[in-house]
Image (spheres, rainbow, N blue to C red):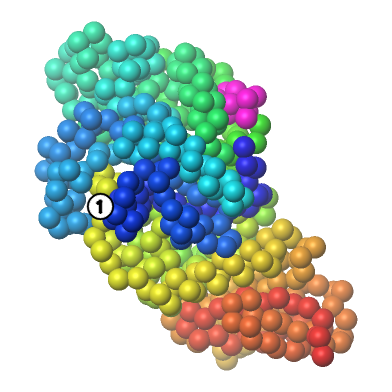
Amino acid sequence: MTELPAQPVVYEVNTRVWLREVGRRTGGPAGLGDVPKDAWDEITPHGIDAVWLMGVWERSPRGRGIALWDPSLRTAFDRAVPGVEEGEIAGSPYCIRRYEVDATLGGAEGLAAARAELDSRGIGLLLDYVPNHVAPDSPWVTEHPEYFVRGTVDEVRRDPAAYLDTGTAVLARGRDPFFPPWPDVVQLNAFEPALRRATTDVLGRIGQVCDGVRCDMAMLLMNDIFARTWGQRAGSPPPDDFWPTVIGGVRERHPAMTFVAEAYWDLEWDLQQQGFDFCYDKRLYDRVLNEGPESVRQHLTADETYQRKLVRFLENHDEPRAAETLHPAKERAAAVLIATLPGATLWHEGQFTGRRTHLPVFLDRRPDEPADTALRAFHERLLAGVHRSGMRTGRWQLLECAGWSDNASAANLLAWCWAGPAGRFLTVLNLSDQPAQGRVRLPWPELDPGTWELTGLLDGERYTRSGTELTGPGLFVGLDAWGTHVLAVGRDRD
């Protein structure tokens, strides 16, 4: 097992879509064991620590059938991919029949080949786990009805959208507390000891073929959330929570296995305490997209230890494409922001080339879109520059940006620094559509009054300043709208 760095950079790939396009380019088979090295190169640019192959498990034929007959889904499919054909609708990757690699992707042998390819590059592999529900044709439905939240014959008769009659038992359909039931999945019972043991066993087996898992909607299994969703139907909550029990059991077999929680509702801290290495930082995503720099600054005042266990992102398969939601200059500024903060960083295949179509996960084909080569070059410089610098191995600190009585534009500047064995580094960005000026005082009293050089990691620009200025009134910064500086601070070489 590859042990991921303390703050990994992860690249999410829609596996079926990617393999389809690789096969179209090569004119050959499109299983995981057939991918040429240049295709692996494309999804492992310098600075990536792990690849998340989203959607490798066996999808449910029954769930696919439900999707094919759902008018609202078919409308969404056709909107994303006009003229999409039935054979291009694979079903949901989160309606899982069995945790076995889909035969159409190359099966277990194909995944082993993919992992070996990644391992040869020093890159880890993440896969999905869906703890809340399984497909209605999962073997568990008939073999282990005790794993599920149950209903009655009267309830399924009154509300067939919320319950499934298997012929031998009535089981609840999967849901979260704020939305109607999902029609294509069946609800597991997080309070059932046998289900917890089975989950631990499945994750233990998954841990043999990858280095970590991204756990879908992880907060739904927490005792208080589950009790609020299902009430007495689930039975009495056990004394121990779901995730400490499960993760503790898995780590007896795989101590270095990484657990990532898809998390919402401000439950990131709680899930960290329950054993997750990293949790989605959806709050930062929302603030960057929809709120101002002060909101982002306040978010970043949280304890550094907590922030190091968050996953920063600008898009993923659940969210709209960044190129669609952000002005191009703001997108670059936001990318600098998440790349230089503490925590894990999540990038999404197609994000670097400016794809705009938010593809439903049910589909295994996406529309052709022209690649933005300048955007790709920017992201590759950013990832490589941050990685080579080693900045994120040091200690991070949020900095103040001071302005003047007649110029309040410093309020739009955000600044932070890293200091450690790799050196000293400063990030400043203007999170607004207007020019901004301010001074940033560096928190390094050891900088003597001599001359210091500030070198741009992305553009190579050099600036020389005295240590007296840097630690006294502070570095003067003037940035255009959405402008950024990512600077290494070192002794003036001249």
Q: Is residue 253 magenta?
A: yes
Mark 1 belongs to which amino acid?
Arg
Q: Quadrant of the C terminus?
A: bottom right
Q: Position of residue 325 (x, y in %)?
A: 34, 66
* Residue at left offset 12%, top offset 55%: 83
Badge 1: few (under 14), some or many (20 or more) residues near its Cα, within 10 Å?
many
**Label 1's element?**
loop
The answer to whether 294 is drawn above or below residue 142 in the figure is below
| Chief SS of the magenta region | helix
Q: Position of residue 320 (x, y in %)?
A: 33, 58
Residue 261 in sight: no
The answer to whether 198 is drawn above or below residue 119 in the figure is above
Q: Residue furthest top?
A: 168
Q: Quadrant of the N terminus?
A: top right
Q: Is residue 114 left or right of residue 61?
A: right
Nearer the observer, 251 or 153:
251
* Residue at left offset 70%, top offset 63%: 390
Query: Which contiguous range is marked in magenta?
Result: 244-254
Residue beneath disc 1: 365
The answer to whether 304 is drawn above or below residue 218 in the figure is below
Q: Is residue 452 magenta?
A: no
Residue 77 in sight: yes
Q: Position of residue 287 (x, y in %)?
A: 46, 62
* Residue at left offset 17%, top offset 33%: 65
Q: Is residue 16 left or right of residue 377?
A: left
Q: Position of residue 343 (x, y in %)?
A: 60, 54
